[in-house]
Image (cartoon, grey):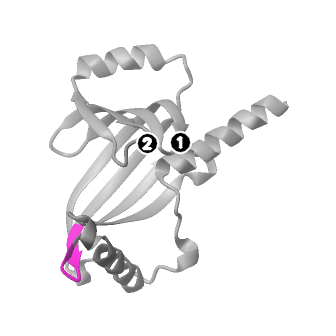
Amino acid sequence: LEKLGFVLRDTLHQTNHYLELFSSDSYQRLCREMNENKVRYYLTVKTSQSRTDVQEEISSLVYEAFMGQTKHNGVPVVYKESRIWLGAIDRVPTKVLLEHLEGMGPYSGYYLHLEAIAPTEDLIAQAGEALGHLARELKLQSRERIQQSEVGLLLSWATGQRLGQLET
């Protein structure tokens, strides 16, 4: 990535508690996020009616109150470490995350997450082309691409776990 002009910007450690997990488009997540400088807590709500999620920073007291309520409910917990690289491909601002996920059964492991920033809809095609260019530069094969989000993978695994419990 350094050869492509990317700079390592940050390393984040997250603990995500999925309070409600209806679909990959609809969930509530409680997060504790830590980097070398600080710890922050937030609640994320994503609904199927919205393309983006709503994230609200909360205090550690509110986080602990939620944790007290969820301790015995068996909510899915995902641990994530993200190394965040920033740069540009074809003059499109781009973010690359090397992520290590735990708590997702067979889907736990390392992932490379590519993001291109398209501030307006007319730049979406250009951002898509830049991501394709970056994938080729990184020698990623199309068979290695996963179209599901982290939440989608978690939901697949959790559903399989629950079905397995029903069968026994």
- Amino acid at dot 2: Tyr
Determine the residue positioned at 49% across, 46% down. 151
Whether residue 117 is visible to the viewer of this picture, yes or no, is no
Residue 73 placement: quadrant: top right
Q: In this view, does 98 lie above or below 20?
A: below
Residue 79 numbered tag: 2
Q: Main secondary structure of the magenta part?
A: strand
Residue 47 placement: quadrant: top left
Depth check: give the residue in front, 131 or 103.
131
Residue 99 placement: quadrant: bottom left
> What crowding class fits label 1: few (fewer than 14 Cα within 10 Å), some (14-19), or many (20 or more)?
some
Pinpoint residue 79: horizontal percent, then vertical percent: 43, 42
Pinpoint residue 93: horizontal percent, then vertical percent: 20, 70
Quadrant occupied by the N terminus: bottom left
Pinpoint residue 103: horizontal percent, then vertical percent: 53, 42
Q: Is disc 1 placed on a helix, strand or loop?
A: loop
Q: Give the Cα distance between marks 1 and 2.
A: 6 Å
- Which of marks 2 and 1 precedes in the sequence? 2
Q: Do the residues labelled 1 and 2 touch (CB within 8 Å)?
A: yes
Q: Is disc 2 placed on a helix, strand or loop?
A: strand
Determine the residue positioned at 79% across, 29% down. 166
- Amino acid at dot 1: Gly
* Residue annotated with mark 1: 103
Determine the residue positioned at 75% across, 36% down. 163
Q: Give the range drawn in magenta.
A: 86-92
Taking the view exactly as shown, the residue that stands out farthest to the right is 168
Pinpoint residue 87: horizontal percent, then vertical percent: 20, 72
Residue 47 lies in the magenta stretch: no
Determine the residue positioned at 52% across, 34% down. 21
Q: In this view, does 160 lie to the left or right of 99?
A: right
